[in-house]
Image: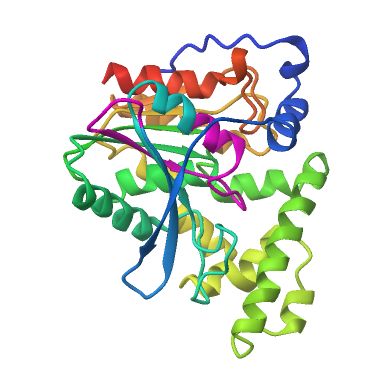
Amino acid sequence: MPLVPADYRPPFLFRNGHFSTIYHGLFRKVNGLVQRRERLELPDGDFLDLDWSESAVPTQKAVVLLHGLEGDAQRPYITGSAKYLNQYGFDACAVNFRGCSGEPNRKYRSYHSGATEDLVTIVHHLLNQKPYSEIFLMGYSLGGNVALKYLGEGNPVPKQIKGAVTVSVPCDLHDACIELLKPKNILYARRFKKHLIAKLKEKHRMFPEKISKEQIKSIVTLKDFDDVYTGPAHGFKCALDYYRKCSSKQFLVPIQIPSLIINAKNDSFLGHDCYPFREAEKNPNLHLEIPDFGGHVGFWGAQNVTYAERRAVAFFSSI
């Protein structure tokens, strides 16, 4: 489908991509959401923690919420989405990827941008737990890449999955990595690296035979992290092999359910290849929206409901 026109007109300050990104990452607060945590045991002996919030009225509709790199289900962009979805008759299942719920996961592996096997397990769990007739996916950044890859890579997608909304998606992981390594993103890259290295040191304590202190010390950039840990721990030859095989862009044309990608034009994390114009033109199910503003997961909204959250409810309700 051709480009979807965007009707996003934020206040002046939120037209700056960096201000939007930083504000929503560090200062936005979401109150009043009631959640319950469920531990989901995975087929390989590991676990995921799911944070559930429910619609005020009985419903057969649920949304699976997927967070970004080094995020969790308590980030405001996830809790804000869950709260708004609950108000409009959707249960929300907010996923904490492996090792992201405040407790280290059991395995040496963890999560990554292409780990769709865990999403397969989550969807089956939802269908077995409650007879949902409609399930939707909503993913931010890394989580958006996971959702799109899942839908287009050939998994047997259950008929109950009706649509997806993805926000600030690094559809080409190598391209996004190149952008993150540029000086304009040095503060974000340092923050990501700090959290990733802390987790990797914990992996060293748990699995000293698999990664050494020297290997950890050799990590200077985020790409180094993927060369040292993400790639080898998850069956890839190196960072570039991981990026090539897990980028969702190559899986967009086969997607068979309505899917919306919202990538802001001023998202400093995304290079040109992260805006899949050609793929959207080839696939009538793929809706691509590129607002001028929004930064990275930084869409503003009145009454503390972001543009992306409102668009998700509108899109899901239209299917």
- 40 to 73, vertically: above or below: below
Is 4 placed left or right of 175 in the picture?
Answer: left
Is 146 placed left or right of 105 in the picture?
Answer: left
Q: What is the quadrant of the N terminus in the image? A: top left
Residue 250 seen in render: no
Task: Write down the quadrant of residue 15 in the picture.
Answer: top right
Image position, residue 38 (x, y; %)? 40, 55
For the point 49% across and 56% down, the residue is 97
Asked which colour scheme the image uses, the reply is rainbow
- 28 to 131, vertically: above or below: above
For the point 32% across and 53% down, the residue is 122
Q: Which residues are magenta?
A: 55-81
Image position, residue 91 (x, y; %)? 34, 34
- 5 to 179, vertically: above or below: above
Is 72 placed left or right of 37 in the picture?
Answer: right
The reply to whether the magenta stretch includes residue 195 is no
Q: What is the quadrant of the C terminus in the image? A: top left
Task: Write down the quadrant of residue 87 in the picture.
Answer: top left
Image position, residue 135 (x, y; %)? 27, 37
Task: Write down the quadrant of residue 246 in the picture.
Answer: bottom left
Q: Nearer the viewer, residue 97 or 229?
A: 97
